[in-house]
Image (cartoon, rainbow, N blue to C red):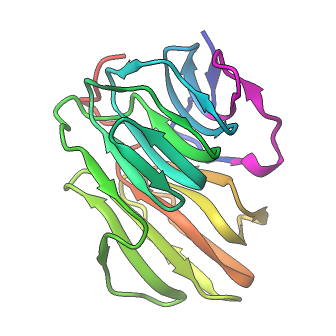
């Protein structure tokens, strides 16, 4: 069984933009693995690339699936999901995903609570605007249920930004960049911090856009793996 960045008690940073693509069992679908427990059936956080015209066969998600479209258009029987779309498919759902034009997605598998049954689709621009704070120009809440808070944030250029971290925190850089703990982050960089380690960053001259999730890094009642 593969185990990759599975220790949730330590800080983990992975710079996906510089990683090699690893082929999946489906031709034309490749992955950059950020965190994983398992082989093909896995609790995983990954960046996945679909070549134009590629498709996965129909498969289920017993533990749920959460994804953000980073590039292109992701497609399945429920519709087309352009860049910037955020989707939560709860435990028990199934689909045959693919992409006619090609796409790249950030995806998390088998990390839902067993009772999390809400299907969420946020097309680009959808979501609730939240108050800004120092160093932040725009905040859109994509999902919140009292257990998780998922947001898209825009951070000012050359700014200091802090995010309190009571329960656990992870982020993916979508554009721009910053430094954190002396380490440089750019597009497709992923950072996971255990509870109690607040996020403190300094953005660069372009600022940064990030996907951000606050909540337990593994729910105590997560759907059985």
In percent of the image, x 43 and y 67: which residue is there? 124
The structure residue drawn at horizontal position 50% and vertical position 85%, both measured from the top left corner, is 136
Image spot of residue 69 (x, y percent) = 53, 52
Q: Residue at x 20, y 55 (%)?
A: 145
The quarter holding residue 52 reads top right
Residue 10 percent across, percent down from the top left: 58, 42
- Magenta stretch: residue 19 in it? yes
Observer able to see residue 169? no
Quadrant, the C terminus: top left
Position above or below: 57 against 157:
above
Can you tell which quarter of the image residue 159 is in? bottom right
- Would you say 39 lies left or right of 146 here? right
The span picked out in magenta is: 14-34
**At x 74% / y 63%, what residue is drawn?**
186
Magenta run includes residue 126: no
Q: Nearer the viewer, residue 110 or 167?
A: 110
Residue 63 x, y percent position in the rendering: 33, 25
Residue 140, x across and y down, in percent: 38, 74
Whether residue 219 is visible here, answered yes or no, is yes
Q: Which is nearer the eye, 128 or 145?
A: 128
Q: How many numbered markers are drawn?
A: 0
Q: Which of 78 and 194 is in front in this view?
A: 78
On the image, which quarter does residue 139 sit in?
bottom left
Q: Which residue occupies the extreme top position in the image? A: 1
Report the quarter where the N terminus lies.
top right
In the depicted structure, whether residue 214 falls above or below residue 99 = below
């Amino acid at each position: 069984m593969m185990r990759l960045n599975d220790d949730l008690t330590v800080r983990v940073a992975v710079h996906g933009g510089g990683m090699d693509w690893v082929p999946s069992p489906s031709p034309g679908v490749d992955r950059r693995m950020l965190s994983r427990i398992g082989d093909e059936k896995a609790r995983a956080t990954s960046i996945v690339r679909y070549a134009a015209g590629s498709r996965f066969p129909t498969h289920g998600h017993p533990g749920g699936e959460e994804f953000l479209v980073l590039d292109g258009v992701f497609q399945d029987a429920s519709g087309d999901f352009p860049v910037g779309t955020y989707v939560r498919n709860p435990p028990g759902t199934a689909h045959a995903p693919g992409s006619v034009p090609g796409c790249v997605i950030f995806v998390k598998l088998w990390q839902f609570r067993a009772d999390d049954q809400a299907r969420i689709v946020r097309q680009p621009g959808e979501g609730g605007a939240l108050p800004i704070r120092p160093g932040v120009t725009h905040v859109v809440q994509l999902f919140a249920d009292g257990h998780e808070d998922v947001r898209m944030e825009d951070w000012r250029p050359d700014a200091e930004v802090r995010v309190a971290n009571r329960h656990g925190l992870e982020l993916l850089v979508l554009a721009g960049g910053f430094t954190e703990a002396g380490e440089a982050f750019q597009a497709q960089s992923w950072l996971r911090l255990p509870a109690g380690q607040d996020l403190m960053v300094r953005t660069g001259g372009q600022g940064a856009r990030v996907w951000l999730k606050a909540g337990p890094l593994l729910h105590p009642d997560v759907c059985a793996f």
